[in-house]
Amino acid sequence: MNSRLSGTVLQRLTRSGSACCRHQAGPRFGPCRGLTESGRGTMNVFNRDMKKRQKNWSASLQDRDQYDYLRDEVGSRVADRVYDIARTFPLALDVGGGKSHIAEHLSKDVVERLFLTDISEKTLKRSRKTEIPTSCVLADEEFLPFKENTFDLVMSSLSLHWINDLPGALRQIHQVLKPDGVFIGAMAGGETLYELRCSLQMAETEREGGFSPHVSPYTAVTDLGNLLGQAGFNMLTVDVDEVQVHYPGIMEVMMDLQGMGESNCAWNRRSLLHRDTLLAAAAIYKEMYGNEDGSVPATFDILYMIGWKPHESQAKPAQRGSATMSFGDLSKISQPTSTDRP
């Protein structure tokens, strides 16, 4: 049996509320040393060509399907949120959808036709067949090649956290939606992979006297609502789901991230790790975060978002000052009334 699956811990997806030595994630778009600004005035954090090569390499692996467990799980949870909306969507778009990880959990009764985009051509060629008629389009998530007011539904799962201009990408999604259309997405954020980050930083500091970023920066959940509002969405819903996957050790964590096409592609990343540093990081990982059965956890904070494009038919808040009862009057409702005895 493959050693990476020993103890059936590799693909055991659980939710956990534990926290230990977490690295607080900050806003992705704040000033940061080593980052450059693109010609559009946005922070150029990620090498998009590198991300394309990583995803193409991942799609070319013979055992590529065994790395899809996280994408399949998150894709199913995004699909659950689509089912929560009681309507049929004639035309939908999956941004960065890869192998149709969302569509395989949907039926034709909910989505009648789907456009699937991805930056990786090889990934699109590996897209799974579903009952929904699907058209594959090779496109960068930062430059959507669709006309305004085209789609009734836009979805995205585990793709937007590699976008340099996330506010711009959300504005484009808003633009291609029809009025009263809805965007439902999921992205890694918050304190994702804090165990790996802390272990590598501590090991490098001990062995080399300093550390380099090996885990990419992530968007904080506190920023996501503001970004959606600035893009023009209303009736917002943002929530966080913590998914924890257990592995035999740090090497298996890093190997699976590479197999998923989720390796770091930040411009200021350090491509190589010294052997002594990696061994030290493995020991720190097990000592600080290891389970009793010898496995180690890797935590993924998945940020889910729902936003609607405004339309006159949508419910609107009442005008200020239109209330007919004050909060002071509400406190009297539960008070018993006094009655005179005969």
Image (spheres, rainbow, N blue to C red):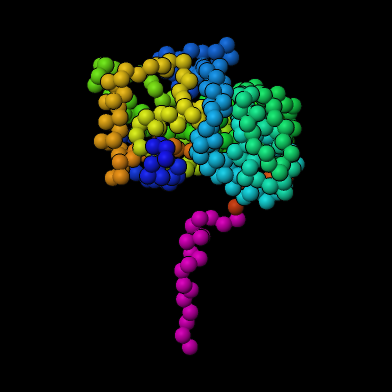
- Percent x, y of residue 341: 46, 85
Determine the image quadrant of residue 72: top right
The residue located at (47%, 61%) in the rendering is 331
Between 148 and 331, the one lying in front of the other is 148
Does the stretch in magenta take in 334? yes
- Percent x, y of residue 306: 59, 40
Q: Which residues are magenta?
A: 324-342
- Percent x, y of residue 15: 42, 46
The residue located at (58%, 14%) in the rendering is 40
The residue located at (39%, 37%) in the rendering is 3
The residue located at (38%, 41%) in the rendering is 6
Would residue 329 be found to the left or right of residue 318 on screen?
left
Q: Quadrant of the N terminus?
A: top left
Q: Is residue 173 visible?
A: no
Would residue 275 be found to the left or right of residue 220 on screen?
left
Determine the image quadrant of residue 234: top right
Q: Main secondary structure of the magenta part?
A: loop
Between 176 and 58, the one lying in front of the other is 58
